[in-house]
Amino acid sequence: NLNGFEPATDVVASEQLLALDYWIVRQCQLLQAEVIGHYHEYNFLNIYQKLHNFCVIELGGFYLDVIKDRQYTTQADSRARRSTQTAMYQVLEMLSRMIAPILSFTADEIWQNIPGERASSVFLTDYSDAADILPESADFTDDFWRQLLDVKTAVNRELEVKRAEKTVGSGLSAEVDLYCEGDLAENLGRLEEELRFVLIVSRASILPAAAAPEAAVKTEVEGLSLTVSGSDHSKCERCWHHREDVGANAEYPGLCLRCVNNVDAEGEQRRYA
């Protein structure tokens, strides 16, 4: 959703992007470098496969899901929202260029609807230089996000089981306890309170592996078991998260304090996702 986004004034510098946004831009840049190489070799099958996998897995199956909350609940001109809009803007430009040789009309139609001043056609532009690829983040590496994607997949699998059992409805009606140790626990802990936004649940807690109950499900992620339960807390009317602080502000009885902050104060600060 690039509604209200003006590139000339709203683009966030790469070093100011939230960690998840920085990662998706870098992944698309790496993909573009591969795609250009395949075009030089007329290797159209690999181009199709790589574009399809990126759009289905990293982009559609992970990134776009995670950023929905930030898009629609943070303040319109906040760094959190402008950061994700910047990432989507840059990814959209790159994808338009990448598909142009094989989906010409579609690419040009997309290009003409991207915000900001630009060439009249995608075919009058160049690919960005490979030298412009963002360096890998020292704190949130590519491997870090791949591991998070695996953890999210494991959580989603158990959420589906609980939905079938009618224990939970949407992911936001659920709370997740993650039992793990070592590097995995440390990595998950880096996201702090924002881990729940990545997993798209109302609460995500990291607990010692030894504390896992018998009912905990062992996952395909090495060293990780988890439990999913329905939340007992009220649902925020604005963000739909189930939080214990819903109604804590008498002026906004249907909102959680995070949403009160976004509606009637300085707004929440996001750092990672």
Image (cartoon, rainbow, N blue to C red):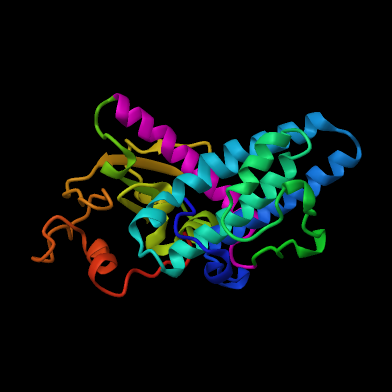
Residue 146 in the magenta stretch? The answer is yes
Outermost residue toward the right?
41
Identify the magenta region. 138-164
Position in image of residue 164 (x %, y %): 31, 24
Position in image of residue 269 (x %, y %): 39, 70
Image quadrant in which you'd find residue 90: bottom right
Outermost residue toward the top?
164
For image coordinates 68% across by 40% down, the residue present is 107
Residue 245 in the magenta stretch? The answer is no
Q: How many marks?
A: 0
For image coordinates 22% across by 45% down, the residue present is 231
- Most foreground residue, 76 or 123: 123
Position in image of residue 21 (x %, y %): 55, 59
Tell me if I can see residue 222 in this picture. Answer: no
Relative horizontal placement of residue 232, taking residue 200 as reference (left or right): left
Position in image of residue 76 (x %, y %): 38, 63
Relative horizontal placement of residue 231, taking residue 223 as reference (left or right): left
Tell me if I can see residue 252 in this picture. Answer: yes
Outermost residue toward the bottom?
266
For image coordinates 27% across by 34% down, the residue present is 169
